[in-house]
Image (cartoon, helix red, strand yellow):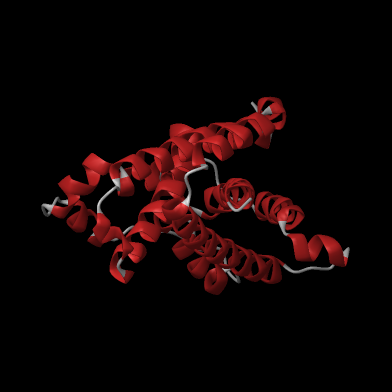
């Protein structure tokens, strides 16, 4: 398993993400021919949608292998989003108290980390650190691809 | 006895979490952080690594926000989008 993780380079992750993200952008563009998109509010929503598409594309490229990507997919999947707005029992699930044992000395920063990493609130410390490492790698890849796209567009 | 029982009830963890495992993971995380790598110091505490990790994740989020804004502006006004996209995919 570990060797498989080493050969899984960020390359395949990058390509998968790039493809999904670009097709999402194209889809958005073809859908967005209304003149209302030039208002400030329209631009802001457009930015929001692009941001969500980026995170979603990355989570999809990673798949269900990682807890953080599963958390992103369940939060933002378009159909799941509509269902959750109808008052699902997910709110009740969040209020369930989970008795965890925090290792001493890591409490303060671990709390902040849990808020930053998707799905981090219900992980034990080991998983949290692992997921964080993977999450950071994917985020960095995501930023590089978006940077490349932005550079190409402005030529 | 009871603490062991509650620990085994955690999701996915019937193994106890040792300090060594955590230190291992923390050092692995340390390798990914750009700042600490450049400092080349071995005496970085776990708290620092976690703090730097939080800062790094936040800065990455901010970059994603900025890039989304840029892309949003560029997407609106670009007719050569198709060519740029194809070129970009080929360069991957």
Q: How many marks?
A: 0
Q: Residue furthest bottom?
A: A108
Image coordinates for residue B51, horizontal then vertical, percent: 63, 71
Is the residue A83 above or below the residue B22 in the image? above
Is the residue A60 above or below the residue B28 in the image? above
* Point 22% across, 54% down: residue: A93
Image coordinates for residue A44, horizontal then vertical, percent: 35, 65
Image coordinates for residue B90, horizontal then vertical, percent: 65, 29
Q: Is residue B9 visible?
A: no
Q: Residue furthest front?
A: B79
User: Which residue occupies the foreground of this view, A143 or B59?
Assistant: A143
Instruction: Using residue A58 as the reference point, say whether residue A143 is left or right of it.
Output: right
Q: Is residue A80 visible?
A: yes
Instruction: Using residue B40 as the reference point, say whether residue A111 is left or right of it.
Output: left
Instruction: Using residue B63 as the reference point, say whether residue B23 is left or right of it.
Output: right
Is the residue B37 above or below the residue A77 in the image? below
* Point 15% across, 51% down: residue: A89
Answer with the quarter of the image where residue A94 lies: bottom left
* Point 79% across, 68% down: residue: B44
Image coordinates for residue A50, horizontal then vertical, percent: 41, 52
* Point 50% across, 69% down: residue: A112
User: Which residue occupies the foreground of this view, B28 or A10?
Assistant: A10
Q: Quadrant of the N terminus of chain A?
A: top right
User: Which residue occupies the foreground of this view, A116 or A16?
Assistant: A16
């Amino acid at each position: 398993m570990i060797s498989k993780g080493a050969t899984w380079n960020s390359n395949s992750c990058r390509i998968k993400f790039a493809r999904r993200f670009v097709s999402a952008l194209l889809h958005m563009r073809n859908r967005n021919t209304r003149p209302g998109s030039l208002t400030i509010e329209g631009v802001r929503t457009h930015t929001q949608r692009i941001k969500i598409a980026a995170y979603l594309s990355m989570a999809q490229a990673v798949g269900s292998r990682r807890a953080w990507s599963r958390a992103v997919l369940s939060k933002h999947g378009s159909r799941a989003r509509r269902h959750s707005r109808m008052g699902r029992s997910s709110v009740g699930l969040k209020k369930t108290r989970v008795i965890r044992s925090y290792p001493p000395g890591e409490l303060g920063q671990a709390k902040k980390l849990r808020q930053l990493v998707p799905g981090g609130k219900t992980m034990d410390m080991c998983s949290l650190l692992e997921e964080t490492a993977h999450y950071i790698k994917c985020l960095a890849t995501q930023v590089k691809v978006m940077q490349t796209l932005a550079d190409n567009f402005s030529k | 006895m009871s603490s062991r029982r509650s620990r085994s009830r955690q999701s996915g963890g019937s193994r106890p979490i040792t300090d060594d495992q955590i230190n291992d993971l923390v050092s692995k995380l340390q390798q990914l952080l750009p700042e600490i790598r450049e400092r080349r110091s071995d005496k970085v505490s776990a708290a620092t690594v976690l703090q730097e990790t939080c800062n790094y994740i936040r800065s990455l989020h901010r970059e994603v926000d900025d890039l989304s804004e840029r892309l949003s502006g560029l997407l609106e006004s670009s007719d050569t989008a198709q060519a740029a996209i194809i070129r970009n995919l080929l360069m991957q």
